[in-house]
Image (tube, grey):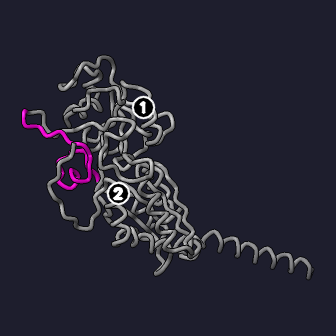
Amino acid sequence: MKRNKIVYLFLLVTLFVTAACKSDKKGNPNWMKEDDVNVAIDETFKPIMDNLVQSYGMAYPEANMKPQYVSEDEAIRMLAHDSLRCAIVTRKLKENELNLIRSHRLDATQALIASDAIALVINKENNDSLITLDEVKGIVSGRITRWEQLAKNRGRKGELHLIFDNSGSSTVRYMKDSLCNGQDLKGNVYASEGKNNESVLKMVEENPNIIGVVGANWLMGKQGNAMADFSKLPFKVMRVSRTADEFAKYVRPYQYYIATADYPLLRSVYAIHTDPRSQSMLKNFYFYLKGQKGQTIICNNSQMLPITPVQVKDVSIK
C-alpha cells in the first residue's frame, strides 16, 4: 500500500512538472534562452539582413544568432503562433494576428525601419527595359501577356512571363494589394523553381522572355555591396515610370529614386517583436536595427532607405 502511495505521488509530481513545462512557453519570458536571437526574416531581405545579423553578432559575441529566411506569410505565422518572437516583414500585423499573439499573453511592438522597392529584372539580351506602372498592372491582371503589347517594345516577340519567388511572398502580396485591388494575380505569372529570389535571378539570366520580380536589395555586387551602377550586374534592371505620357520619367530602384519617390514600386520594412523581457539579446537586436549603427548599415549596404533622415542631393545616374 505504501508503495502504491509513492508511485501515485511520483505520477502527480511528473504530471505537474510536465504541465508546467507545457505552459512555461505561454506568457513566460523564460522559455527562450537569454542570448538566443531567433528571427524570422522575409527572404526578399536576405542580402542586407545577412549583413545586419553578422555585424550584430560581431558587436555582441554572446548573441546566438539564428536567422530564418522564409516567406512573409510564414514569418508572420511563426510570430503569431509564438514559435519565435521577432520578424522582419513588409507590413504591420492585422488585428486577427495581434489577437492570436495576445492569446499567448504577449504584445507586439512594431517599428518601421526602412523603405524598400521591388525591382523588375530581365535578361541581358533583352532590349525592352522600359515599362510603365500601368503596364505592370496589365501583366499581373492578365491584360498583357505578350512583349508586343508593351508601348516601348523594341522588337521582342512572344509570350511574356512574370516570375516571382513563391506564392506566399511579400512581392506577390504587394502586387495583389497595390496593383490588383486585393485580387489574385492572373495571366502568365509563375513561381520560381527554387521558391526564392536567388532562383528568380537565375531563371532571368537563362531566359530572355522572363521578367523577374525581386526585392531591390538583391541588386548587389559580388562582395555583397550595394551597386552604384546596375549595368555591372549579370542581368538588366528595368526602368519603371508612373505615367506613359511624353514627360514620363523612367527610373530604376536606386536609393536616390526611392528617397524622392520617383520609383513607383515602393514598400515599407518593419521589425516586429513580442519579447516581454525587459532585457535580452533579441530585444537588443530590434533596437539595433532602429538605431544609428543598424540604420547606417542599411543606408550604406543596400538600396533600401533608412528611417533615419538623410540628405538627398541631385545626382546624375545612368
From the viewer's perspective, is residue 65 above or below residue 6?
above
Label for residue 205?
1
Q: Residue at x 52, y 56 (%)?
A: 68
Q: Is residue 262 magenta?
A: yes
Q: Where, quadrant-wise, is the C terminus in this rendering?
A: top left
Quarter where residue 21 is shown: bottom right
Mark toward the viewer: 2 or 1: 1
Dots 2, 1 in contact, CB < 8 A: no
Where residue 122 sits: x, y (%)? 34, 32
Quarter holding residue 4: bottom right
Q: Residues within 10 Å of mark 1 (few under 14, many from 20)?
A: some
Secondary structure category for the residue under label 2:
loop
**Is 211 part of what is drawn in magenta?**
no
- In the image, the segment drawn in magenta is 246-267
- The residue where tag 2 is placed is 94
Q: Earlier in the sequence, mark 2 or mark 1?
A: 2
Q: For the view shown, which residue lies furthest in the left direction? A: 246
What amino acid type should be assigned to the residue bearing mark 2?
A: Lys
On screen, residue 246 versus residue 110, left or right, reads: left
Query: With 265 as the anchor, is 107 left or right in this view?
Result: right
Kindly indicate the quadrant of the structure image that contains residue 241. Answer: top left
* The one of 251 and 113 positioned closer to us in this rendering: 251
Q: Amino acid at mark 1?
A: Glu
Residue 184 seen in this snapshot: no
Locate the N terminus by quadrant: bottom right
Residue 305's x, y, as percent?
A: 28, 58
Residue 280 % position (x, y): 50, 77
Residue under the point 41% across and 69% down: 286
C-alpha separation, residue under disc 2 versus residue under disc 1: 37 Å
